[in-house]
Image: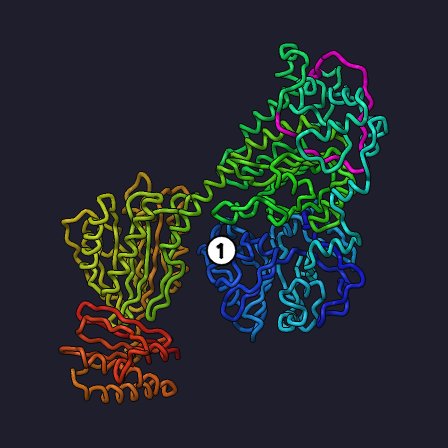
Amino acid sequence: MVDDPNSTPRPTGTAPEPGTAPGDQPSGVVALVRLAVVLVDREGRIAQWSRAAEELFGHRAEAVHDRPAAGLLPAAEPRSVPGQAGPGTTGRRRDTFTTLAELTSDGAAWAGQLPVVDREEHLRDVLWWAYPLAGPAGRLLALAADARPLRTAGPRLALGERLLPFAAAAGALGGFHRLSAALGAAGRPVPGTLAAVLPGAAERRGPLLAALARGGLPALRLDPSTVLPLHPADPAAGTAHAAAGIGRRYPTAQQRTARLGPPAPPEQSAPGRRPAAAPPTAPLPAQREAAAAPAAADRTARSDRPGVDLTTGGVPAPPRGGTTIEQTTVGPSANGHRLHPGDPAAPTAPTAPAAPVAPVAPVAPITVPGPAAAAPPGPSAGRFGPFLTNGHAGEQLALLNEVGGKVGTTLDLGFTAHELCRVLVPRVADFACVDLVDGLISDSELPAARPDDDTMLRRVALARNESAGQWDHVLAEGSLVAMPRRTPPGMALQLNQPVLVPVVTRDVAVDYAAALGGPELVPVVSGRSMLVVPLSARGTVLGILKLLRLPDRDPFDEGDAATLKELAARAALSLDNARLHRAESRVATTLQRSMIPTRPPQIPGVQIAHRYLPGDSRAEVGGDWFDAIQLPGSRVALVVGDVMGHGLHSAAAMGRFRTAMQTLAALDLPPGQLLRHLDNLAHKLGDDHLATCLYAVYDPINRTCELASAGHVPPVLVHPDGTGELLEIPAGAPIGVGGVPFVAKTIDVTDGSMLVLCTDGLVEVRGGDIGAGLAALCGNLIDPRQSPEEACDVVLDRLHSDDRKDDVALLVARFDGVAPSEVATWDLTVDQREVGRARALVREQLAAWHLESIGDTVVLLVSELVTNAVRVARDRVQLQLIRVDKLLVEVSDDNHNLPSLEPAEQLGETGRGLTLVTKLAERWGTARKAVGKVVWFELPL
């Protein structure tokens, strides 16, 4: 299992958290899990978003802080297919925090599995522990953990302060598929390790600790009989905590150099190098020059070499031109294993007398190869021509060719990074990882500033040679880390140059581990050979490629650095292409989602559900749309449309049509007239705007539905007995054609009926007739006893297939109607004396509905609105009260001029009606009708 190196025990002498259990460490066996912590405040906004939440869900804390929790993290609920016991393969998308709030609405904590869709649109299997809060502490405390690594390798265990691997039999590997979230017994104290990850200062965590103790501490259920308490694997102290645990202060590279003094002369031995028993290699030209020159001249040559040396010593640097062709022909192979003269691929070149190996200081050198320059005089290129296709040079060319063929096969950023790591391990290195600048992944724009010590890197991909060592403490994919410049990765990132560490000594390893926040990384990298290459494309540093070799292989050299720098440049172009493609897709997807509703409106007398499936799963953009618009009199307009074509152009046209449709619907025009106005608008927008559309208006009081079509797929009405009827509506012509009338049809609907509206992408089968899909939709496909959400799932499961390339928009409305006893309507004459009558009628009706508690407010507001209506009306005024889950009051008249809210300083004896409505009503508004206007307001019950 891969765990974050931050999982270190608290140093001794640290005070426990106030209000927690007496022991900071677990007293028995507990599971250590990387926990994400999210706190939602009383206003429904994100108050806390931990580092682990950033890694798990992809959203940065500064981007989500004080943002509404609703809509931030979509949840995918598994949907069941009728007739099958197991869940279906897909699920409908809901909002995660809204779902958690509903699950804890009874005041009890909840634990379970709820898959979510992260920022990169990847489905993540997540275990949740949700605790409802009350008072100023917030509304909801949510703890989350990634279920995938837990179910594949099992959790880490802790016994006191010792971390023990889970003792699973070989046959049981991957057998944790039944692992689930659970809650412990209520009333137990919160351990200090768990309290440390909670947000806020220690003295302010009381309500959070109380909620945890009251609801039960988080736990993991391994099987029906085994439940383990859960502790966070990462104490809140982070890097500072790890440094305190080691008990030392880390000096910078310059401080170490000053402490160690000048480098040793070339004649000294080389501690820290490979054992003498290792197969010897021919000396490099730079080594021969170093052996012949005095030590002082050698130091001067090294100080003049372009590049960066954190420390001195090690193999002397080659000339300014980098590696020479002689170095290429005699050195080790590209995969790090030595070539011997007897090998078929070994070059046969004149040998030179062995020179003493250059010294290595106690701290291994970290070098940055300088820019290419003219190579020193040497053998002619023709002499070494055969080695361009075999030996070390041949391996380099083969490696570069393989990278060109195997890396960048798709436009998926994560998959491209994995391809790069898989090419390099174990051929070139025992460990490889790609860390990209998090801003390039989470933001749509490139960072303006150059990388620095605070730049966050996200681990996108890693590969390791499982047979070559243990890598348990290496940061997992998705982890966030900041690499300071004193470390090799930080230097490569900030200087945009390769950084070579032939042998990582303990001091370098300690610095590197401290930057990552965990001292257990010291043995992982100590003694290894490290090469860090920047991934730079089009003038932007995207991240770094980090490679490690174990001691049983030759360390990386300057030749490897030159080869892998070229390899990284090619791979960086593929990564940048994938980034640009994803940014373009994200723009298109954002445009699409901003123009279609994310959740159905709550309208009395009708239940609505909808789905949208893009034809192109990569772009997720198209021209299909749907809408539900509330109209006066508790009526609702249902719209489904399809712009001809695909892609961003169709999505932009769809946005125009939807906006125009909402504007025209606000005028309360009949369906036929509305489509006529929309057709006229399409002609003004251009000849390339063609769309089909279906517009229906449902009246829950009169129980009628008026429909008009513009060349769209006819709707299906499912009666309460389950039979489906394909409604015959005059088809008309698509919007934008012109010259064809749009004729509406009114039908009577029964309570419990369902109206199914869709686009042709759902019912059109390639090579078949659209009638077959409509016939299936009219069959016994929908059970009227189902909810609209369930009906949408059933329709998509039965009719939609993944091989279809057209967008699908589906809207299902269940007509429940409003009971006549819940509606009161009065026609008033245009007379000021009707105001008093209206007050008496309203007070009497509220008493019959047992709503006397809001009577005074309703009577006051009705009096003001009726007074305004009588003043401007010509022939008629109507007053209507509707009681559903709220009280809706409407005052209509035959004057089409809408009233406006005047500033308070301009008010005299008159004009205060709308000001009172604004202050006292929960919601209010005005709308034009076919004749006149309506002013309405709502009050909660």
Residue 363's place in the image compared with 288, above or below, is below
Q: Is residue 355 magenta?
A: yes
For the C terminus, the quadrant is bottom left
* Amino acid residing under circle 1: Ala
Compare residues 198 and 156 and report the one nearer the observer.
Answer: 198
Secondary element at image label 1: strand
Q: Is residue 882 visible?
A: no
Residue plotted at (14% across, 49% down): 739
Residue 20's place in the image compared with 581, above or below, is below
Task: Report the number of discs.
Answer: 1
Residue 700's place in the image compared with 745, above or below, is below
Residue 396's place in the image compared with 45, above or below, is above
Q: Quadrant of residue 266?
A: top right
Residue plotted at (30% across, 69% down): 751
Q: Is residue 714 visible?
A: yes
Q: Position of residue 30 (x, y in %)?
A: 72, 60
Residue on which disc 1 sits: 76
Compare residues 440 and 376 and report the one nearer the observer.
Answer: 376
The answer to whether 910 appears left or right of 128 in the picture is left
- Which residue range is magenta in the image? 344-372
Q: Position of residue 118 (x, y in %)?
A: 52, 52
Q: How is the image coloured?
A: rainbow
Q: Residue furthest right?
A: 268
Q: Is residue 848 magenta?
A: no
The answer to whether 443 appears left or right of 724 in the picture is right
Q: Position of residue 381 (x, y in %)?
A: 63, 12
Disc 1 crowd rating (10 Å Cα; few below 14, some 14-19, many 20+) is many
Q: Main secondary structure of the magenta part?
A: loop
